[in-house]
Image: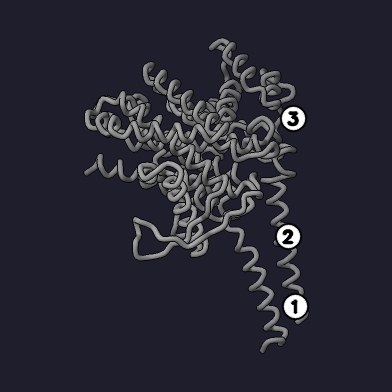
Amino acid sequence: MFGYIKPFRPELRLREDEEYKAVYCGLCKELGRSFGLFARMTLSYDFAFMAMFFMALDEDICPSYEKCSCIAHPFKKRCRCCENRAVSLSAKAAMILTYYKLKDDLTDKGFFKKIAAAFLMPFASSARKKALAFGNEAKFIDNAAAKMMEEQQKLEKENCGISDMAAEPTAKFLEELISLGGNDKNEPVLRRFGYLLGRYIYLCDAIDDLESDRKNKNYNPFLLSGEDALSEAKAVLFMTVAELSDDLDLLELKRYKETVENTVSLGLKSEVERIINKKGGEKNG
Amino acid sequence: MKDINAAYDQIQKDRKAGRTSYQSQSYGGGYNSGSYTGGYYNAGGYNQGYNQSYSGSSQFSDIRRLIQQNRIAEADELLDGVPDYKRNAEWYFLKGSVYYRRGWLGEAARCYQRAYQMEPGNQEYAAAWQRISYQRQYGSSPMSGTQRGCSCDCCDLCAGLMCLDCLCGNWC
């Protein structure tokens, strides 16, 4: 995933901001501990959110914090969230997804991207194997990710111009991934939340890559959908964000409620605005 | 003092009334009972509350029922089987509901808009399209934005109580 899911930090309380940073650090440390230094490079906001969201959903996971030092910030001790089910699940998901992302990059047309992917592949591949050794949940994620990649390639071959359809594989993958954090009671709501979140990620990424895809003649659903791709994309993303907020209202969050709500109702929206404005500026400038 | 107390009571009463009306409008008894107005968990997407007016005139009442029962694939199959010349505003509205439930929000918006344009006088289509245009423009749903900063409620109440306390002379 690509870092499109983060809180709108100016609106967070100091305590909430500290907690968020602690989860972020906790995930980084867990990636390093379980999968090595390479894995820490793949740290992203999306998986930090996933860890936090899972902790918010599950009362039984009780996050604890500790002070630690960090290579990236050598002079200041930081708080970090200790390892728990949510954090380790996010770390595994991150590794599996990195593997599939690199595998996809290997088929990319860009020369440098291919080289970089080929260079990193052995690390990712061994990290994925390690993750799979941890148990059934990782296998479940791996299957879902493999299916996503297969369906995505099929759609790209068909040159699908309907953005809803193009977003479906990613959406379905996130639906499965997010459903891991649920129970029988909240599963339907959670599945829709995951689906919409996947849509959001895919569409943001598609808009973000619009220019480079045009240049490299890569597939992009918005290149095929006609004239005013940007404003239509913004409307459809805004609608997705609105539906996500509505869906979240129906979920019972045990902790981190404000941060999760902030991320969904403010963070996602400001991210859409950032991407769209950037593109608008490029066009005019 | 009496006036102040009366005014305070009035405010509290209004707030309570305001709150309950808001709750019954958008949350109802939780999503299980299906009274979430104009949203996913409302049985059938957007068609709740307007069903009466349709019971006689709906061409696609069987499809409507399927959507309400969340049997989306079947409903979609039936809709696709309707020949082009029979596809009226209601057809587009129901197709929109099917897309909406599947999470295909772009196509859903297109269909809802089409239904509204074909029959602008229809309350049901107008309500659906209005809600969606709001979402597309503002990135939140009507009725949700103002209520989301819930901490306000409690602060307001606190401030109100402090004010009352001051006026009663307990503090000053």
Is residue B129 or residue A45 the one in the foreground? A45
On screen, A35 above or below A170? below
Q: CA distance from mark 2 to mark 1?
A: 20 Å
Q: Is residue A207 above or below residue A143?
A: below
Seen at 24% across and 42% down, the residue is A284
Q: Is the residue marked by circle 2 packed among few (<14), some (14-19), or many (20+) residues within 10 Å?
A: few
Q: Please say if A16 is above or below A101.
A: below
What residue is at 33 percent from the left and 31 percent from the top?
Answer: A121
Residue A42 lies, in percent from the top left, at 38, 42
- Total marks shown come to 3
The part of the image, by quadrant, that contains residue B47 is top right
Label 3: which secondary element:
helix
Quick one: A85 or B7, which is closer to the camera?
Answer: A85
Callouts 1 and 3 in the same chain: yes
Is disc 2 placed on a helix, strand or loop?
Answer: helix
Amino acid type, mark 1: Asp
Tell me if I can see residue B116 in this picture: no
> In the displayed structure, does residue A233 sit left or right of residue A197?
left
| Disc 1 residue crowd, few under 14, some 14–19, many 20+, Cα 10 Å | few
Asked whether the viewer can see residue B132, the reply is yes
Say which of B35 and B17 sits in front: B35
**Residue carrying label 2:** B16
- Which numbered circle lies on residue B52? 3
In the image, taking residue A21 as reference, residue B118 lies left or right, namely right
Q: Nearer the viewer, mark 2 or mark 3?
A: 2
Is A251 on the left or on the right of A161, as rendered? right
Mark 2 and mark 3: span between their CA atoms? 31 Å
Q: Amino acid at mark 3?
A: Gln
List the residue tagged with mark 1.
B3
Label 1 resides on the chain identified as B
- Give residue B78's position: percent from left, percent from top: 62, 14
Q: Quadrant of the C terminus of chain B?
A: bottom right
